[in-house]
């Protein structure tokens, strides 16, 4: 479905689908985390919800043994992982197409998110990301700034979530 | 100017007239009025008819607890709402309202004959009257009761409004913005807490709005209110008016319903009508105040009889005198102030009739100064007047004896039986209540949630007491969060403190059994009904309530519960706490269905998952069916085709040439790691060790109990990597089950599971020409039968896209399943459709898929199995790795009852007359046995539009595998069907077509 984009300054929120990103899910035992990070030349944060940047991407800890990796150099990542496999058993699965990512910004973006997300979003620190729900769809919510978020949605759930966001956006524009 | 409006008085805008209609007649009110205050300003007290006796009724309150003045409101098609409280509905330009429960008109109503027959319609009337004969219940009694029940008429059109929802987190939520709530919010906000303050009214202030003469901190109470609200705003307090806290749930979650547009003249575009807030607060402060109790005496429901506090509100907030000649009947000091305010505003006070013998000297003096006649130690024993009170009959009471009556003429009667703390939300938390013997009321006791209760809500009275208590509640709330704040001080002049005595029904010199002394106005329950209920054996207040319907109306007994309890307790000769109080439940006030539904209507009624090819299917006229959370293309009807014809065509086309099917919803799990094969051996019944790279196998998953849970084709991509597919509905369940075993039973295994259901779009090509359609698009793979035999898998390029290509079949035809990254799903679909043109490629949906697989006897887990079917029952013993040391469910398969004979086993059925069987139909062996017949199984799948030219069915039948060729019977409403037990494989039993 189409989302209206309001690029004028008064728009309460802006909702934009980001171009296709390259995502991997990395699963490795916690005791191999540090060595795996070194092998992949990236930081693998230890605390769930923490993020770290690296030369060609970004990592997010989603569980004690689960990381999400965004990268612009997938081939290098896959090669490095393959090299480390015998020493550091793990799984590295491409999930680029599993999700779509929306970028949500604007002065009323917290209200927009509060229409469907039961978390205290105001309390989500900038630079962190959490797995949560929007309405009944599982999403990963990234906070990039005071009024800047990304939302990863499993592809088949996206039409539902986007329809809800469109309704909420209309409501915010109505101002009531 | 309205006859009863005092120029310049109140908080309404005297320069802004607002027109509205009531029962077709035009009236004028002012901006800031409610429908009730505007009608009263016009001298209209008669606003409705009661539920049971159709007695004329007027507004008895000025708030959300109103039981009588329920009206229908409308603003055009679809926007009619019944049972709106006239006391809450704000006036808007052009508002159309109507009274309810009357015919032919409000002033003359036929149904009022019920009132004449009052003595017949006593408590339990329905139970006693409609008992016999039994056969009358369905046809006569129930339809009659249903037709007579209910207030107002339900809207019949779809509601064009939208409704919103939002979550809100805060440190402190304050419910009620009267003096206590404002003081609480103020101290909490000053301490630095995030505070939300809500009030159900259109403006904040609570009782202060009705008491402008009180002075707080050297300013008039309204000046103080304005500055304090401005201060709260400056402190960042989120202030929400027209917002009712309707329910208080676990862990300090409070639901708020905010009314956004009902008060607006014009509807802003896209604005929701109401918004439901789900608030999670660290601390909740309940400052809901108290509700005034009516007095119970004969004729206490006549229009013009209203609560004293309500009259005070109409006067001070709306500038409306409720009458010219007003009598006051009270057992509480508060009503005296209402009398004084009205007297000072120009109404004559006919008398203050107090049930008490000892009166406060200052009040008596103030009455004397105003020349008001005071009758102490009196009771009221009746009222007169047809559609409006004309007089009240009063008698002195001395030593328990009711003396001679006197008649006092009046055009309004204000009553006050004291005040009941509003404990509804506190009760939602299951907090316990304690009976306060002095004030004869229940007060909050043990708390189960992090909450404070302040002000009149815990029995305090007077402005200073409420302000001090609210301040303390705010301090206590922030202290619990580790914040501190010094105590606030309040200087109140002209405070209006008060006490009262609690009453059962007032004593009378007439027959108490004939008195129409109402306890519950909305449900027409009288004191007589309550006493009758006790006489007839009801002992618990819960039974009394259900027998009489006291407190069961939409006002949830806000005014009737305590009066009802006092009377029931008196009749039982017990103390009220021994009789008990009924439980309050959410919502606090009636709440629209729309507010509860929120965004869950239309397109977002419920979460619907869609595949990348969903848009194509929709554009090509697919009929859809829901499968788990997905919507899937069911069949693709061509013009003029019904489902039967479309499915038959799709089946034929696929078997004759080639069909294309969107299988993207299949669950997919990547099982990866050095121990992947060991994990697969333990999870699935099949052996996996020897499965070659690039080969697939049908996998069967059991539960620990040995029953079939899921199945799917599994490909081995590399030594350490399996591409597992699951059923559409089972995807999440299977992943959870696998994770559960991995984390709790086998944490030593180096294997990880990743859901890839949505990573891949999956398209199935089936039919003798499938290879011809696919081959031109494939790079890097020899598709020939020799190089890529049935049950193979390979990574290759299809239509230029990276793909995982399976050769498998769920139709019995030559088949392929092509997985490409989901974003390319539609691209691949279009490429295959283009390539398939030469072969009349036919898109088919889930129904054809079901038929084709049934013709081959392939089961669908959840349709042909029901959680009690073993692999043996389903004829799948070939899928069990007999040499494996263990797998989930293995030991259970040896349990005596799983290997016994006579278990229900999956078989095929063909009817003798070629008729179709009904799925779910029960099967018997001997149709002539007496009822109840012994049922030996049921039909699990049945289709009549496949390739064979006759219907086929699958069924589970006791000992079915040993009954091949036998005839069974299926009794149906239209007669008994006969069917022969067959193999489940109806088509191409040797599987030659797969090998193409």
Image: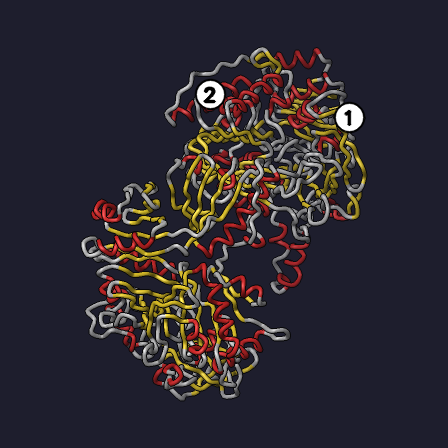
Residue shown at 35%/69% (left/top)?
Answer: B711
How far across and how far down the image is residue A124, in percent? 40, 37
Residue count near mark 1 (Cα–Cα under 10 Å), binned few <14, some 14–19, many ≥20: many
Front: mark 1 or 2 = 2
Element under disc 2:
helix
- Residue where numbered disc 1 is placed: B4
Q: Is residue B12 visible?
A: yes
Residue shown at 48%/64% (left/top)?
Answer: B827
Res. B447 image quadrant: top left
- Residue where numbered disc 2 is placed: B190
How far across and how far down the image is residue B776, in percent? 43, 74
Q: Please state which of residues B295 and B337 is positioned toward the viewer in this rendering.
A: B337
How far across and how far down the image is residue B862, in percent? 41, 68
Q: Earlier in the sequence, mark 1 or mark 2?
A: 1
The answer to whether residue B635 is above or below residue B760 is below
Q: Please state which of residues B750 and A81 is positioned toward the viewer in this rendering.
A: A81
The answer to whether residue A168 is above or below residue B844 is above
Q: Is residue B576 left or right of residue B274?
A: left
Residue shown at 53%/80% (left/top)?
Answer: B945
Q: Is residue B653 left or right of residue A36?
A: right
Which quadrant of the figure contains the N terminus of chain A? bottom right
Q: How is the image coloured?
A: secondary structure
Chain of the residue that carries numbered disc 1 in the rendered image: B
Chain of the residue that carries numbered disc 2 in the rendered image: B
Q: Is residue B580 visible?
A: no
Element under disc 1:
loop
How far across and how far down the image is residue B709, in percent? 35, 66
Q: Please state which of residues B484 and B230 is positioned toward the viewer in this rendering.
A: B230
């Amino acid at each position: 479905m189409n989302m209206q984009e309001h690029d004028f300054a008064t728009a309460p929120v802006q909702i934009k689908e980001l171009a296709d990103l390259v995502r991997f899910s990395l699963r490795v035992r916690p005791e191999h985390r540090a060595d795996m990070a070194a092998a992949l030349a990236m930081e693998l944060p230890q605390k769930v919800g923490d993020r770290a940047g690296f030369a060609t991407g970004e990592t997010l800890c989603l569980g004690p043994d689960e990381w999400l990796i965004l990268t612009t150099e997938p081939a290098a990542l896959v090669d490095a992982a393959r090299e480390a496999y015998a020493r550091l058993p793990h799984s590295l699965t491409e999930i680029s197409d599993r999700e779509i990512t929306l970028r949500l910004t604007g002065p009323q973006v917290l209200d927009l998110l509060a229409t469907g997300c039961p978390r205290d979003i105001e309390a989500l620190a900038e630079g962190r990301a959490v797995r949560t729900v929007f309405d009944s769809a599982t999403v990963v919510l990234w906070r990039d700034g005071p009024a800047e978020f990304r939302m990863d949605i499993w592809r088949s759930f996206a039409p539902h979530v986007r329809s809800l966001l469109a309704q909420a956006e209309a409501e915010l524009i109505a101002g009531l | 100017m309205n006859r009863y409006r005092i120029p310049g008085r109140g908080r309404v805008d005297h320069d802004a007239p607002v027109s509205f209609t009531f029962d077709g007649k035009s009236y004028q009110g002012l901006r800031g009025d409610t429908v009730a205050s505007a009608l009263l300003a016009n001298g209209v007290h008669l606003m409705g008819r009661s539920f049971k006796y159709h007695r004329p009724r007027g507004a008895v309150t000025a708030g959300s607890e109103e039981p009588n003045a329920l009206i229908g409101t409308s603003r055009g098609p679809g926007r009619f709402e019944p049972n709106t409280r006239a006391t809450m509905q704000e006036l808007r330009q052009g508002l159309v309202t109507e009274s309810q429960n009357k015919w032919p008109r409000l002033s003359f109503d036929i149904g009022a004959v019920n009132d004449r027959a009052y003595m017949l319609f006593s408590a339990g009337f329905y139970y006693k009257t409609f008992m016999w004969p039994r056969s009358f219940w369905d046809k006569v009694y129930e339809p009659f009761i249903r037709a007579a029940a209910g207030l107002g008429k339900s809207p019949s059109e779809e509601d064009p409004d939208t409704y919103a929802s939002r979550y809100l987190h805060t440190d402190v939520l304050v419910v009620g913005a009267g003096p206590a709530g404002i003081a609480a919010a103020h101290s909490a906000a000053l301490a630095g807490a995030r505070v939300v303050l809500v009030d159900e009214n259109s403006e904040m202030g609570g009782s202060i709005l009705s008491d402008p003469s009180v002075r707080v901190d050297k300013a008039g109470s309204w000046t103080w209110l304005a500055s304090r609200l401005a201060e709260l705003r400056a402190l960042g307090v989120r202030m929400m008016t027209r917002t009712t806290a309707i329910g208080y749930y676990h862990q300090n979650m409070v639901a708020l319903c905010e009314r956004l547009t009902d008060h607006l003249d014009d509807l802003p575009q896209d604005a929701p009508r109401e918004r439901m807030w789900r608030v999670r607060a660290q601390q909740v402060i309940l400052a809901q105040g108290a509700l005034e109790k009516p007095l119970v005496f004969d004729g206490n429901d006549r229009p013009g009889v209203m609560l004293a506090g309500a009259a005070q509100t109409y006067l001070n907030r709306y500038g409306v005198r409720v009458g010219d000649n007003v009598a006051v009947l009270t057992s509480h000091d508060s009503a005296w102030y209402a009398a004084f305010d009205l007297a000072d505003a120009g109404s004559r006070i006919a008398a203050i009739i107090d049930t008490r013998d000892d009166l406060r000297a200052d009040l008596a003096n103030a009455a004397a100064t105003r020349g008001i006649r005071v009758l102490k130690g009196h009771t009221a024993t009746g009222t007169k007047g047809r559609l409006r009170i004309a007089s009240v009959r009063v008698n002195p009471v001395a030593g328990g004896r009711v003396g001679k009556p006197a008649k006092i003429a009046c055009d309004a009667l204000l009553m006050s039986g004291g005040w009941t703390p509003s404990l509804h939300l506190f009760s939602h938390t299951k907090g316990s209540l304690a009976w306060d013997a002095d004030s004869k009321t229940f007060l909050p006791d043990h708390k189960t949630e992090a909450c404070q209760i302040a002000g009149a809500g815990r029995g305090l009275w007077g402005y200073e007491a409420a302000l001090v208590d609210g301040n303390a509640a705010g301090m206590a709330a922030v202290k619990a969060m580790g914040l501190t704040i010094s105590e606030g001080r309040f200087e109140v002049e002209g405070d209006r403190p008060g006490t009262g005595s609690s009453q059962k029904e007032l004593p009378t010199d007439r027959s108490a059994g004939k008195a129409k002394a109402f306890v519950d106005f909305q449900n027409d329950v009288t004191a007589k009904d309550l006493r009758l209920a006790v006489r007839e054996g009801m002992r618990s207040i819960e039974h009394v309530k259900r027998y009489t319907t006291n407190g069961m109306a939409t006002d949830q007994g806000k005014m009737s519960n305590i009066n009802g309890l006092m009377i029931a307790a008196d009749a039982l000769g017990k103390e009220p706490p021994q009789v008990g109080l009924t439980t309050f439940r959410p919502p606090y006030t009636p709440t629209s269905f729309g507010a509860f539904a929120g965004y869950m209507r239309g397109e977002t009624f419920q979460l619907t998952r869609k595949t990348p090819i969903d848009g194509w299917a929709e554009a090509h006229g697919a009929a859809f069916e829901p499968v788990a959370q997905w919507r899937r293309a069911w069949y693709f009807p061509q013009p003029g085709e019904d489902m039967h014809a479309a499915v038959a065509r799709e089946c034929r086309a696929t078997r004759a040439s080639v069909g294309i099917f969107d299988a993207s919803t299949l669950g997919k799990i990547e099982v990866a790691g050095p121990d992947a094969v060991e994990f697969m051996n333990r999870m699935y019944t099949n052996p996996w060790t020897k499965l070659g790279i690039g080969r697939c196998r049908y996998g069967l998953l059991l539960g620990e109990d040995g029953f079939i849970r899921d199945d799917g084709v599994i490909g081995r991509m590399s030594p350490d990597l399996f591409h597992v597919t699951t059923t559409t509905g089972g995807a999440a369940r299977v992943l959870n089950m696998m994770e559960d075993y991995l984390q709790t039973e086998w944490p030593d295994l180096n294997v990880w599971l990743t859901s890839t259901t949505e990573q891949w779009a999956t398209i199935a090509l089936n039919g003798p020409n499938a290879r011809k359609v696919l081959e031109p698009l494939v790079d890097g793979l020899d598709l020939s039968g020799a190089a890529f035999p049935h049950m193979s898998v390979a990574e290759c390029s299809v239509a230029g896209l990276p793909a995982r290509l399976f050769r498998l079949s769920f139709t019995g035809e030559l088949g392929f399943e092509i997985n490409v990254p989901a974003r390319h799903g539609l691209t691949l679909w279009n490429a295959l459709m283009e390539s398939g043109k030469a072969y009349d490629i036919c898109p088919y949906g889930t129904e054809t898929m079901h038929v084709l697989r049934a013709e081959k006897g392939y089961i669908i887990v959840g349709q042909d199995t029901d959680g009690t079917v073993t692999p043996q029952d389903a004829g799948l013993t070939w899928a069990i790795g007999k040499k494996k040391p263990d797998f989930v469910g293995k030991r259970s398969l040896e349990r005596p009852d799983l290997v016994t004979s006579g278990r229900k086993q999956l078989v095929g059925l063909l009817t003798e007359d070629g008729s179709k069987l009904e799925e779910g139909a029960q099967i018997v062996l001997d149709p002539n046995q007496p009822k109840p017949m012994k049922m030996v199984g049921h039909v699990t799948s049945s289709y009549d539009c496949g390739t064979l030219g006759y219907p086929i069915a699958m069924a589970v039948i006791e000992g079915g595998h040993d009954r091949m060729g036998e005839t069974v019977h299926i009794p149906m409403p239209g007669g008994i069907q006969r069917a022969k037990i067959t193999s489940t494989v109806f088509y191409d039993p040797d599987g030659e077509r797969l090998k193409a």
